[in-house]
Image (spheres, grey):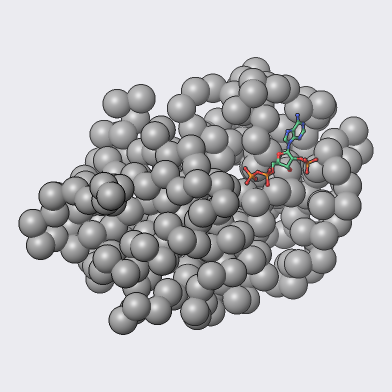
Amino acid sequence: MTDKYAKPFNGLDRYAVVGNPIAHSKSPLIHEAFAKQTNQDISYERILAPLDGFEATVRGLIAKGYKGANVTVPFKFEAYKICDSLTTRVVSSGSGAVNTLINIDGKILGDNTDGVGLRSDIEQNLKFPIADKNILILGAGGAAHGVLNSLVGAKSITIANRTSEKALQLVMSISDINDVRAKMFDELDVPYDLIINATSTGLTDTALPISNIIFAQGCLAYDMMYGRETPFMRQARENGAQVADGLGMLVEQAAEAFYIWRGVRPETQSVIQQIRSLA
Ligand code: ATR
C-alpha cells in the first residue's frame, strides 16, 4: 500500500494543514517563509482529508510523529471534538472550533489562532484600534464563531445573518461585551465603525442585501476572504470605506500557530507582501 503521507523529510519536524479542499491553501508557503526567516528546520504539507475521514487522517499524522497541524474548512468543529485537551482561549471563547493542533507525546492539544490573527491584522497591520468601536459582523457561521472572542473591548457588536436563529445563537455565546445584538440584513439602518464580512458569499460572488448606510465615515470594511475583491469589498469601497481582505489575518493566524509550535515569533509584514505578490 502506498503511504499517502510519505514525503522525504530528512529528519525535519513535520507539520501540515488538513482540509477539504486543500489544493488552494497558502499555508505551506507561509510556514516555509516563517521557517526560512527564523532558521527553523521544518516541513509543512497540504493534506486532503476525506469528508468522513478527518479524525483518521489526524490520528495517522500523530502516529507518524507530526508535531502539529493546522485545520481548515470544513473541519474546525470536528477538530475541537477530537482533541484530548484544549487551550484556555478555546474553552473560554465557547466557539467550539479549533484551527491548530499540537502533538504532545501523542495526545492532541487544540488551540484556535483565528481570533488573534484577525485582531493583529486589524490593529497592528491596518492600524485600526478595536476599543470602543461599534462593530457589525455579517454572517454567523464557522468563520464568525472563530473570531468573535477576539473583539473584546468593542463598544458594541451587532451580528447580522440570513438565518436569524444562528445570529441569535452567536449573540448568546458572547459574555465579555455588554452591548451585543442580532439583526436581519434588512434591519441594518445605522453606520458602523468596523464591518467584518464573515459570510461565505465572496466564494460565489454574491452581493449581500445590505444598505450603504452601514458604512460610517472613516470605517474599516474587512472581508475574511482573500484573493480577489468580493462584492462586499466593492460596495464598501464605493461608499468610501477603508477596505481590507483576509490575507493579513491568514498570515497572522499562521504566525501565532508557528509561535505555539516553535517558540519563535516570525515577522509577518514581509510574508504578507510576499504572499500577496504571488496572488
Ligand atoms: P464558514 O465556516 O465559512 O463560516 P458556514 O459555517 O457555512 O461557513 O457559514 C457561512 C455563512 O455565510 C453563514 O453565515 C451563511 O448564512 P446562513 O447562516 O443563513 O446560512 C452565510 N451565507 C452563505 N451564503 C449566503 C448568501 N447567499 N447570502 C447571505 N448569507 C450567506
Seen in the image, is 243 located left or right of residue 18? right
Q: Measured along the vertical axis of the image, is residue 205 above or below residue 30?
A: above
Question: For residue 278, which quarter of the picture?
Answer: top left
The x and y percentages for residue 122 are 50, 48
Seen in the image, is 111 located left or right of residue 224? left
Residue 136 vs residue 254, the one in the foreground: 254
Total marks shown come to 0
Which residue is rendered at x = 67% and y = 70% of the image? 94
Seen in the image, is 253 located left or right of residue 34? right
Which residue is rendered at x = 54% and y = 35% of the image? 225
Quadrant in which ligand 1 is drawn: top right
In this view, the residue farthest toward the front is 1
Residue 67 appears anywhere in the view: no
Seen in the image, is 91 located left or right of residue 40? right
Residue 72 vs residue 244, the one in the foreground: 72
The x and y percentages for residue 67 are 28, 67
The x and y percentages for residue 56 are 46, 61
Which residue is rendered at x = 50% and y = 56% of the image? 54
Which residue is rendered at x = 28% and y = 50% of the image? 1
Quadrant of the rendering where the C terminus is positioned: top left
Q: Measured along the vertical axis of the image, is residue 115 above or below residue 110?
A: above
Residue 145 vs residue 19, the one in the foreground: 19
Residue 69 appears anywhere in the view: yes
Q: Measured along the vertical axis of the image, is residue 123 above or below residue 211?
A: below
In this view, the residue farthest toward the left is 10
The x and y percentages for residue 270 are 25, 41
Question: For residue 193, which quarter of the picture?
Answer: top right
